[in-house]
Amino acid sequence: MLSEPTAFTLGSIIYAKTRENKQLIRAGFLSSAPSWNWSRQFRNFHPEWDGVRFLFSEQIESCDVLFVYDAVPGNSAFKVRAKHRVFIASEPSSVKSYLPSFLNQFDRVLTTDQNTKHLNVVFSQLGLPWLVGAWDSDGKLLDQPLGYSDFEQFSPAKTKHLSIVTSNKAFTEGHRARLAFADRIKAYFGSDVDVFGRGINGFADKLEVLAPYRYHIAIENSTSSNYWTEKLADPFLTLTYPIYHGCPNILEYFPAQSVTQINILNPDDAIQKIKKIIDSDEAERALPHLQEARKLVLNDHNLFAILAKLANELASETIPQDRGRPYRLKPERSFQPRFAKLGNAGKRLSRRLTKSLTRFFEH
């Protein structure tokens, strides 16, 4: 591991320098979830990857490359000086399409949406953040969640059989299909499956619904190519064999022996596949492949491994001299037509009113 860096200024760009005289690329990272402990995805919580030092602060003023994940935080524009600006579009096209005028603020866009309108689009899986091991028993974010180094050696005892996580959310077709399939699973397997989820059978952290289980049914809300989430990464981190519905080309990312794919839109076939798997010793036989999949989650398909690779590629590019000047970065709402802003405000008011009425009638 590199030693602790010191900072120095060269021209108008600030660099980090280690005692080994290596210049570190300074990468600013902004997101719609600033309170999330992003450092958990680094070894020993040290936010450095392959010569790139990541800076997690909403007060970033200068960096070599700025990464913006999901959204520009806050409701107003701010100035930042960076040679490169990169946006990570974390939502699939079935959930959200980002405004082209908003995306034009960035030099590159990382996305799985093939319809994204931008001059420099990088189509790739995005290494979306893990959720397992982040909350305490009261459902509050841990100050020191489980991180990279914890999961690297994690080997929980498998004392339970099969779990599935769903919820009573039904906003999208994916949500509704998942909820309907969970009902079928419960009806067929009965006490052989533990069903968890918001509004169904609550839990504080996914560690409870993954670590002790041999098998887990993981269902994405989207079936887009290259788009997969913590719904698959979390079982791999806990060495729980996933029975998976989602990304159709998932075997391009993980060993075939580490996962079984199902299609919940063909529930009878999916249920028979699940029954065959859980009646076998597949989870035990697959352990070496689960361990390999976990290494891939930690090292290759980690969000910051992906961003560090891109940062190194960008650092080698020749860019115009004025690229490092301060740039006024605006949130997406700044690019919405006025009537759309009013419509969004109305939706927010409607949601608040619905919640208030619900609480009133429940009491």
Image (cartoon, helix red, strand yellow):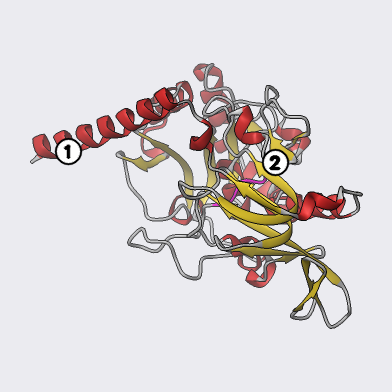
The image position of residue 114, as x and y in percent, is 70, 24
Q: How crowded is mark 2: few (under 14 residues within 10 Å), some or many (20 or more)?
A: many
Please name whichever residue, 267 or 360, is drawn nearer the observer in this view of the structure: 360
- Residue at mark 1: 356
- Please give the name of the residue rendered at 78% of the width and 80% of the height, measured from the top-left corner: 3
SS for dot 2: loop
The image position of residue 279, as x and y in percent, is 55, 36
Q: Name the residue under label 2.
A: 106
Quadrant of the image containing the C terminus? top left
Residue positioned 52% across, 28% down in the render: 95
Precedes in sequence: disc 2 or disc 1: 2
Choose between 104 and 258: the one closer to the eye: 104
User: What type is the residue that disc 1 sits on?
Assistant: Ser
Q: Is mark 1 on a helix, strand or loop?
A: helix
Front in this rendered view, residue 171 or 79: 79
Is residue 314 left or right of 227 when viewed as pictured?
Answer: right
Quadrant of the rendering where the N terminus is positioned = bottom right
Q: Residue 354, relative to residue 44: is it above or below?
A: above
Q: Can residue 151 be seen in this view?
A: no
Which residue is drawn at the image coordinates 31% and 39% (left, top)? 200
Q: Would you say residue 66 sits in the magenta stretch? A: no
- Name which residue type carries label 2: Phe
Q: Is the magenta stretch mostly helix, strand or loop?
A: loop
Residue 141 at x, y percent in the picture: 42, 62
Tell me residue 118's x, y (percent).
72, 29
Magenta residues (range): 125-130
Rendered view: 291 above or below 162: below
Query: Residue reaching furthest bottom?
Result: 19
